[in-house]
Image (cartoon, helix red, strand yellow):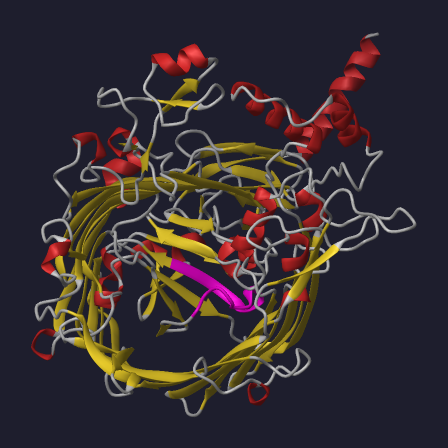
Amino acid sequence: YLFIVQLIFFIAGNVSAQDLAVKGKITDEKGEGLPGVTILVKGTTAGTTSDVAGNYTLSVPNGNAILVVSFIGFQNREVAVNNQATINIALTADTKALEEVVVVGYGTQKKATLTGSVSAVKGEEITKSPTVNVTNSLAGRLPGLTAVGSSGEPGYDGARLRIRGVNTFGNADPLIVVDGVPGRSLERIDPNTIESISVLKDASAAIYGAQAANGVILVTTKRGKVGKPTVSVSFNQGFGRPTRLPEMADAAEYATMLNEIDQYGGKAPRFNAEDLQKFQDGSDPWGHPNTDWFNEVLKPWSGQNQGNVSVSGGSETMKYFVSLTSRSQDGYYYDSGTKYKQHDFRSNLDGNITKNISLSVDLSGRMEDRNFPTRSAGSIFRSVMRGKPNLPAYWPDGTPGPDIEYGDNPVVISTKATGYDRDKRYVFNTNTRLNIKIPWVQGLSFTGNAAIDKGFRFSKNFQTPWYLYSWDGSTRDANGKPVLIKGKKGFDDARLNQIAEENQNILLNGLLNYERTVVENHGIKFLIGAERITGRGDNFNAFRRNFISTAVDQLFAGSVDEFTSNNGSGYTNARLNYFGRVNYDFKNKYLAEFVWRYQASYIFERTSRFGFFPGVSLGYVISEEGFWKKALAPVTYFKLRASYGQTGNDLIDPYQFLALFQKNGLAFVTNGGATFNQALYEDVVPNSGVTWEKAIQRNVGFDANFLNDKLTVTADYFNNVRSNILWAKNAAIPKSAGFDPPRENIGKSGNKGFDFGITYNNNLNDFTYQIGLNGGYARNRIIFWDENQNVPEYQFSTGRPIGSSLYYNAIGIFKDQAAVDAYPHWSGARPGDIIFEDVNKDNKIDANDRVRNNKNDVPTWTGGATFN
């Protein structure tokens, strides 16, 4: 026993003699101790962590071991022991997140020095939601950005974008800027070509002046990178289906309800028990059909697909990105006349001409092909909703059913049987940028941009008569088959409306950029630029009817008569802009930015076309202070931000400072007969003082990193006031005045709220993941507009959300005639009808009993979550 014990101690002593005890301290770049740092012996599972002061002790197997040191927010290090007993290790901060560049107006900024409220998303995140329209992919991805779908119709399925809710009862659309060119469309951009999207939500948008009050969305497309050619091929096959369809009554339920109505009205029920049974069992499809109109018109699913091929790469002298995309969407209707196709190309080239001169040339284009029935999606859906279940969509022999309402039957008007509505568009965009570094002034560069956008549209709406078939319920042929009556619907003759449009926009600008640390720790960066934007357009349309054949859909085949129409119009516009930005930082701790724009718009009278729009923002990286590092070390980064600025909104009808005239045709009857004369009449009373809306935007927020930079949080509070909103004094000036008053800058509204974004990054061995959460709240109200004061106070819109509506307040159902007699009601009310509240207690229900709610069609609360 004693021998065994001695042997154990001998072996243990030999093992201990081979180990080496290592100790030391883990610090940051400034010598501050780092707690919780992981120190591992490479190739083993042996390891430890540093204490609150950064100290550690570790036993390594031999003097040749290698220590692997890792800490979230810092770069990993490998350190050789080399038989040292004490090893102090300094870690370098991993500033990749803070060094990340964000696109802002006319340039880029590092996140670390950003003082404005800017949300951004990378293109690779957008393509993870493979929607045909990129605006729908933005829903729930960016704090402060709301995407509300307005239609599922292929080709017109874009979301309505709002930045921090609605700030005006004028036009609330944000400005879209694609690769530095304002006014381009976001909806139809191929998401495979997007590098990033940034949203300017506060005073940082002031650099875009009178077009920025509703916020700015900046889209940057992909460019080539140095390296071997990279070929990317993707194909997506998707399926869409209608959601949240209403549950409709079947024929038996509908007949039962009609019987109840007859009973309440003191009449004999129109359907007997046998009728109800036949509606249920389907034994008499001719006389007792049972139609589910949604099932008859809408397919269970509809296909959509998208394919993309791109090539990118380049050398130090030339880089390229080339992309081709094709996409297609089918309609939701059976035998659908609805279809959308789009084909895109993009070529972005960057070349270095000399050491200090580079040139970029971007070319892109797309073809959009929309095909629809002659009836709109809204009218088709309304017809489906109003279809009676006891009427057939098709008769048992496959013949189209009868007229449902207004000459329509949705299973027919959703197809090509009524003609077609075709809309083809071609868009070509070019952008050339020349960059020159001024060699004799360090940090100074010049950029010149020239962009030309051209668009063409060709539209044909060809409406032809169609036929529906009805049955009187009794007439049959010799074989006992019901005899159907053929009825022509729509117009008696074929009609064609044809449109051709062409437009062009040209942008020219020049920018001077300067960036340098002028004195130790003092960084300065400025931008100054001038820009000229012009646009023009022409359109022509013609109408013909009485075609010789529905097989010929050309203008020459229509008759020339008093209904013939040949028309056209054109427009021009122009803007002149001067703008700039100055950034200052001290040790990346104290930050300041000033942006401005001096802008002239063609929309306003010549002597008052220019406006000045400034914005200022400040930032304080308080986590750089020594007291913070000691007291709040778990919060590794914390920046306070504040901004104040004035922007404008000139999204109004142009030339309101002029008296505008329209042409009208009038027939005068004299002794010689009727004479048709063209006449001019004043359509708009001028307002020489009309100007843009003014938006005062206030914002405070913070950016913070927690848990060794695993968790990042950004949050903002905003308070916006919009004034000078154009509105007519319709309430103050009665109709008896004989004219419509001009719109004046009298409206005022306010909007308050907050938005936030939270991101958590971590990894489990080789598995890296990211969880994101964002949300926001925005509540607007009307402060003033011209409102009729001769209405009850509870109907006032002032003080309530923009777009709120008047509703009757339903408080129950009349159960019997006694209940009807006991409470005020509409004339003709009967048991089963809705009881509406008599709000003003005048013992009658009329328009004065409507109350205004506190809601509109834009959500007050928004949010989203992502997992990557």
> Viewed as shown, does residue 859 lie left or right of 528?
right
Quadrant for residue 799, please give it: top left
Q: Residue furthest bottom?
A: 353
Residue at the image point whose x is 43% and y is 51% from the top? 92
Quadrant for residue 261, please give it: top right
Q: Position of residue 323 (x, y in %)?
A: 60, 76
Q: Is residue 216 visible?
A: yes
719 relative to 325, above or below: above
> Viewed as shown, does residue 564 lie left or right of 443?
right
Q: Position of residue 704 (x, y in %)?
A: 35, 41
168 relative to 102, above or below: above
Looking at the rendered image, the quarter that the N terminus falls into is top right
Residue at the image point whose x is 43% and y is 24% from the top? 834
Residue at the image point whose x is 79% and y is 30% from the top? 278
In the foreground, 487 or 43: 487
Q: Which residues are magenta?
A: 185-198
Q: Position of residue 599 (x, y in %)?
A: 18, 73
In the foreground, 532 or 692: 692
Q: Position of residue 822 (x, y in %)?
A: 35, 12
Q: Is residue 66 visible?
A: no
In the foreground, 229 or 12: 229
Quadrant for residue 60, please give it: top right
Q: Is residue 701 magenta?
A: no
> Viewed as shown, does residue 396 lie left or right of 52?
right
